[in-house]
Image (cartoon, rainbow, N blue to C red):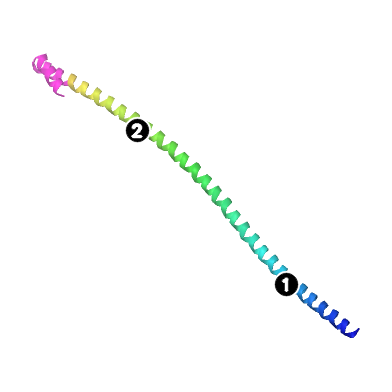
Protein backbone atom coordinates (compact mmCIF):
# COMPACT_ATOMS: atom_id res chain seq x y z
CA UNK A 1 0.00 0.00 0.00
CA UNK A 2 2.86 2.38 0.83
CA UNK A 3 4.52 1.58 -2.49
CA UNK A 4 1.31 2.27 -4.40
CA UNK A 5 0.81 5.49 -2.42
CA UNK A 6 4.41 6.53 -3.17
CA UNK A 7 3.89 5.71 -6.87
CA UNK A 8 0.70 7.76 -7.01
CA UNK A 9 2.39 10.58 -5.13
CA UNK A 10 5.18 10.47 -7.71
CA UNK A 11 2.64 10.61 -10.53
CA UNK A 12 0.90 13.53 -8.82
CA UNK A 13 4.22 15.36 -8.49
CA UNK A 14 5.00 14.76 -12.22
CA UNK A 15 1.50 15.95 -13.21
CA UNK A 16 1.92 19.05 -11.04
CA UNK A 17 5.37 19.72 -12.52
CA UNK A 18 4.01 19.29 -16.04
CA UNK A 19 1.06 21.52 -15.20
CA UNK A 20 3.41 24.15 -13.72
CA UNK A 21 5.60 23.97 -16.85
CA UNK A 22 2.57 24.29 -19.12
CA UNK A 23 1.31 27.29 -17.12
CA UNK A 24 4.73 28.90 -17.58
CA UNK A 25 4.62 28.22 -21.30
CA UNK A 26 1.07 29.53 -21.46
CA UNK A 27 2.09 32.73 -19.65
CA UNK A 28 5.04 33.14 -22.05
CA UNK A 29 2.69 32.66 -24.99
CA UNK A 30 0.31 35.28 -23.53
CA UNK A 31 3.15 37.78 -23.13
CA UNK A 32 4.32 37.11 -26.69
CA UNK A 33 0.74 37.52 -27.92
CA UNK A 34 0.45 40.85 -26.07
CA UNK A 35 3.71 42.01 -27.68
CA UNK A 36 2.48 40.96 -31.11
CA UNK A 37 -0.81 42.78 -30.52
CA UNK A 38 1.11 45.93 -29.57
CA UNK A 39 3.29 45.64 -32.67
CA UNK A 40 0.26 45.06 -34.84
CA UNK A 41 -1.53 48.06 -33.33
CA UNK A 42 1.53 50.28 -33.95
CA UNK A 43 1.80 48.99 -37.52
CA UNK A 44 -1.90 49.62 -38.08
CA UNK A 45 -1.61 53.15 -36.66
CA UNK A 46 1.42 53.81 -38.86
CA UNK A 47 -0.41 52.47 -41.91
CA UNK A 48 -3.44 54.65 -41.17
CA UNK A 49 -1.21 57.70 -40.74
CA UNK A 50 0.59 56.96 -44.02
CA UNK A 51 -2.72 56.42 -45.81
CA UNK A 52 -3.95 59.75 -44.50
CA UNK A 53 -0.68 61.42 -45.50
CA UNK A 54 -0.85 59.83 -48.97
CA UNK A 55 -4.44 60.98 -49.31
CA UNK A 56 -3.38 64.53 -48.45
CA UNK A 57 -0.46 64.29 -50.88
CA UNK A 58 -2.85 63.09 -53.58
CA UNK A 59 -5.13 66.06 -52.86
CA UNK A 60 -2.14 68.42 -52.92
CA UNK A 61 -0.95 66.93 -56.22
CA UNK A 62 -4.41 67.33 -57.74
CA UNK A 63 -4.55 70.95 -56.57
CA UNK A 64 -1.10 71.63 -58.06
CA UNK A 65 -2.14 70.00 -61.31
CA UNK A 66 -5.23 72.24 -61.47
CA UNK A 67 -3.03 75.27 -60.80
CA UNK A 68 -0.66 74.16 -63.56
CA UNK A 69 -3.51 73.80 -66.05
CA UNK A 70 -4.81 77.26 -65.10
CA UNK A 71 -1.30 78.71 -65.50
CA UNK A 72 -0.94 77.04 -68.91
CA UNK A 73 -4.29 78.46 -70.03
CA UNK A 74 -3.27 81.91 -68.74
CA UNK A 75 0.07 81.63 -70.56
CA UNK A 76 -1.69 80.65 -73.79
CA UNK A 77 -4.05 83.62 -73.41
CA UNK A 78 -1.10 85.92 -72.71
CA UNK A 79 0.76 84.59 -75.74
CA UNK A 80 -2.30 85.09 -77.90
CA UNK A 81 -2.76 88.62 -76.54
CA UNK A 82 0.92 89.40 -77.12
CA UNK A 83 0.71 88.18 -80.72
CA UNK A 84 -2.44 90.23 -81.27
CA UNK A 85 -0.77 93.32 -79.77
CA UNK A 86 2.34 92.76 -81.93
CA UNK A 87 0.09 92.64 -84.98
CA UNK A 88 -1.69 95.84 -83.94
CA UNK A 89 1.67 97.51 -83.25
CA UNK A 90 2.97 96.54 -86.70
CA UNK A 91 -0.19 97.95 -88.25
CA UNK A 92 0.18 101.20 -86.30
CA UNK A 93 3.86 101.47 -87.23
CA UNK A 94 2.99 101.02 -90.89
CA UNK A 95 0.30 103.70 -90.60
CA UNK A 96 2.77 106.07 -88.94
CA UNK A 97 5.39 105.43 -91.62
CA UNK A 98 2.81 106.01 -94.37
CA UNK A 99 1.73 109.21 -92.69
CA UNK A 100 5.36 110.32 -92.30
CA UNK A 101 6.05 109.61 -95.98
CA UNK A 102 2.92 111.44 -97.02
CA UNK A 103 3.88 114.40 -94.86
CA UNK A 104 7.40 114.46 -96.31
CA UNK A 105 6.04 114.23 -99.84
CA UNK A 106 6.91 110.57 -100.51
CA UNK A 107 4.60 108.47 -102.58
CA UNK A 108 2.06 106.19 -101.01
CA UNK A 109 3.67 103.28 -102.87
CA UNK A 110 6.90 103.91 -100.96
CA UNK A 111 4.89 103.94 -97.66
CA UNK A 112 3.18 100.69 -98.56
CA UNK A 113 6.54 99.14 -99.46
CA UNK A 114 7.99 100.24 -96.10
CA UNK A 115 4.91 98.87 -94.33
CA UNK A 116 5.22 95.58 -96.18
CA UNK A 117 8.86 95.34 -95.09
CA UNK A 118 7.75 95.52 -91.48
Q: Which mark is drawn over residue 24?
A: 1
Q: Position of residue 42 (x, y in %)?
A: 60, 58
Secondary structure state at the residue bearing disc 2: helix
Q: Name which quarter of the figure residue 116 lies in.
A: top left
- Residue farthest to the top, as pictured: 108
Mark toward the start of the polypeptide (1 vs 2): 1
Q: Name which quarter of the figure residue 9 lies in.
A: bottom right
Q: Left or right of 59: which side holds 1?
A: right
Q: Position of residue 44 (x, y in %)?
A: 60, 54
Q: Which residues are magenta?
A: 96-118
Q: In the displayed structure, would residue 19 be above or below residue 47?
A: below
Q: Left or right of 102: which side holds 14?
A: right
- Residue farthest to the right, as pictured: 1
Q: Foreground: 56 or 41?
A: 41
Secondary structure state at the residue bearing disc 1: helix
Q: Foreground: 10 or 64?
A: 10
Q: Name which quarter of the figure residue 69 lies in.
A: top left
Q: Left or right of 38: which side holds 106?
A: left
Label 2 sits on residue = 75
Amino acid sequence: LKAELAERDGELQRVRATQHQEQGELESARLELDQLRSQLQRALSDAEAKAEENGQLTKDAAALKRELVIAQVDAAKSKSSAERLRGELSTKQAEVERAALSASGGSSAEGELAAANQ
